[in-house]
């Protein structure tokens, strides 16, 4: 955080910059337009953009940065979609494919009962054969073993796949999952809503409009969800802005999104080649613009798994207020070449936050503070 004389100098520089009019809007709490968003993406003045995003972050959260004690479980990577950007998925019978039976998932949960986990995050591929009962049993067994933990499970894409496979309405799938114990949906599968990009990268997958409809139906049923943007592949700046604004519009309608998560694309082991290397400049700009455009989202996540711990620390000064959590076993990003660790201890997470000059706050899925006995 900039303070004292340095803050006054930074303020004067911003007021004299090409983004001075956007600074006035930010200070006044006014909504940033699409045109403003495009200007920000085109601007190379990263420090001014970060300064503006940090103003919003400080206004909402002060020096607090959130983290969660969570566990990731990927039940299968067998998937019918075959997205070009995905290093995680495999076709049925393909080498490297895996599937966990319900009792194997139960074992994974039991193995960590000695830890004070508050969230269990469950995602997988769109499996061609698994019956709906499998998903319900999976959730029930987790809740039976860990009744105090929130089950955040199944992306909008997985929900739509189950509805189509079973021949039932999306609302029926959501209600059954909610009854079994799902309280929130992860934000994956959104990628970029642009039809152009989706035709190039994932034509078989649920489209952007469908993703938003599933999320809104979940919100209307009292379930919360996260939202993501996968950036750094074939999308344009305008397509990033339009994706973020589509989420802002949906949030205006339902208020059900918890957190926005910009996901840095990892290209290793995917079917996309020839891309320029991802830069820290682009990471920080995308996070900062997300904070500025998503005025109705309470939280912006710097997902350390994709960014790396060091870049995630810097992002806390560019609009992000959440680092996600302990994770312990992450497979999707690492199969695509993420070079971060697969786990951070609570002590490591809190140390990272403090070293960035912020105050760590342990949270649950819904950002309620969790008070731990030290």
Image: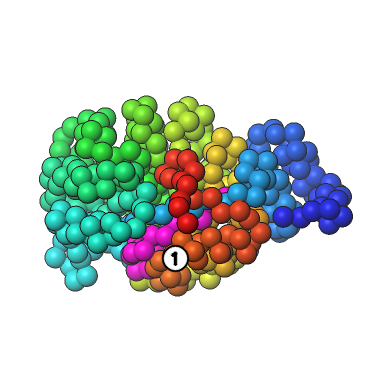
Give me the residue at 33% from left, 38% from top. Answer: 183
* Coordinates of residue 312 in the picture (x, y in percent): 56, 61
Q: Magenta stretch?
A: 319-336
| 115 to 371, vertically: above or below | below
Is 359 left or right of 12, judged from the image as shown?
A: left
Q: Position of residue 356 (x, y in %)?
A: 63, 61
Q: Is residue 87 above or below residue 362?
A: below
Instruction: Name which residue lies at 69% across and 33% down.
Output: 30
Residue 313 position within the rendered picture, expressed as x and y whole percent measured from the top left: 59, 62
Q: Which class describes the residues within 10 Å of circle 1: few (<14), some (14-19), or many (20+)?
A: some
**Label 1 belongs to which residue?**
344
Relative height, residue 360 to residue 278 (above, below): above
Q: Is residue 33 visible?
A: yes
Q: Residue furthest front?
A: 374
Residue 295 falls in which quadrant of the image?
top right
Nearer to the camera, 313 or 97: 313
In the image: residue 202, left or right of residue 346: left
Residue 276 appears in view: no
Residue at horizontal 42%, vertical 44%? Answer: 365
Please state the horizontal and vertical placement of residue 43, each as a whole percent of the image: 70, 54
Residue 28 among magenta residues = no
- Asked whether, in this view, residue 342 is left or right of residue 74, the answer is right
Residue at position x 49%, y 64% from top?
347
Residue 222, quarter of picture: top left
């Amino acid at each position: 955080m900039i303070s004292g004389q340095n803050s006054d100098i930074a303020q004067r520089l911003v007021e004299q910059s090409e983004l001075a009019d956007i600074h006035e809007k930010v200070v006044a709490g006014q909504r940033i337009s699409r045109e403003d968003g495009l200007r920000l993406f085109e601007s190379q003045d990263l420090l001014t953009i970060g300064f503006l995003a940090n103003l919003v972050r400080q206004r909402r959260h002060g020096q607090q940065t959130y983290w969660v004690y969570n566990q990731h479980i990927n039940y299968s990577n067998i998937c019918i979609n075959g997205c070009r950007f995905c290093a995680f998925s495999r076709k049925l019978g393909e080498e490297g494919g895996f599937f966990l039976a319900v009792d194997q998932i139960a074992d994974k949960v039991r193995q960590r009962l000695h830890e004070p986990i508050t969230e269990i995050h469950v995602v997988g591929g769109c499996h061609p054969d698994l019956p709906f009962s499998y998903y319900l049993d999976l959730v029930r067994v987790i809740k039976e073993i860990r009744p105090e933990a929130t089950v955040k499970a199944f992306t909008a894409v997985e929900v739509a796949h189950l509805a189509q496979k079973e021949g039932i309405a999306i609302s029926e799938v959501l209600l059954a999952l909610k009854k079994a114990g799902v309280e929130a949906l992860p934000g994956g599968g959104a990628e970029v809503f642009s039809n152009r990009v989706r035709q190039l990268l994932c034509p078989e997958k649920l489209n952007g409009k469908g993703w938003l409809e599933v999320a809104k139906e979940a919100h209307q049923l009292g379930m919360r969800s996260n939202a993501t943007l996968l950036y750094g592949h074939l999308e344009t700046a305008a397509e990033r802005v339009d994706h973020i604004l589509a989420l802002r519009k949906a949030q205006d309608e339902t208020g059900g999104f918890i957190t926005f998560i910009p996901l840095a694309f990892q290209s290793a082991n995917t079917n996309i080649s020839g891309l320029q290397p991802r830069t820290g400049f682009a990471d920080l700009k995308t996070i900062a613009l997300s904070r500025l455009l998503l005025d109705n989202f309470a939280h912006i996540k710097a997902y350390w798994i994709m960014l790396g711990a060091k870049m995630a620390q810097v992002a806390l000064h560019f609009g992000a207020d959440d680092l996600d959590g302990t994770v312990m076993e992450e497979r999707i990003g690492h199969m695509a070449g993420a070079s971060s660790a697969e786990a951070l201890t609570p002590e490591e997470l809190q140390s990272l936050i403090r070293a960035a000059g912020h105050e760590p706050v342990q949270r649950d899925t819904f950002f309620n503070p969790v008070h731990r006995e030290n």
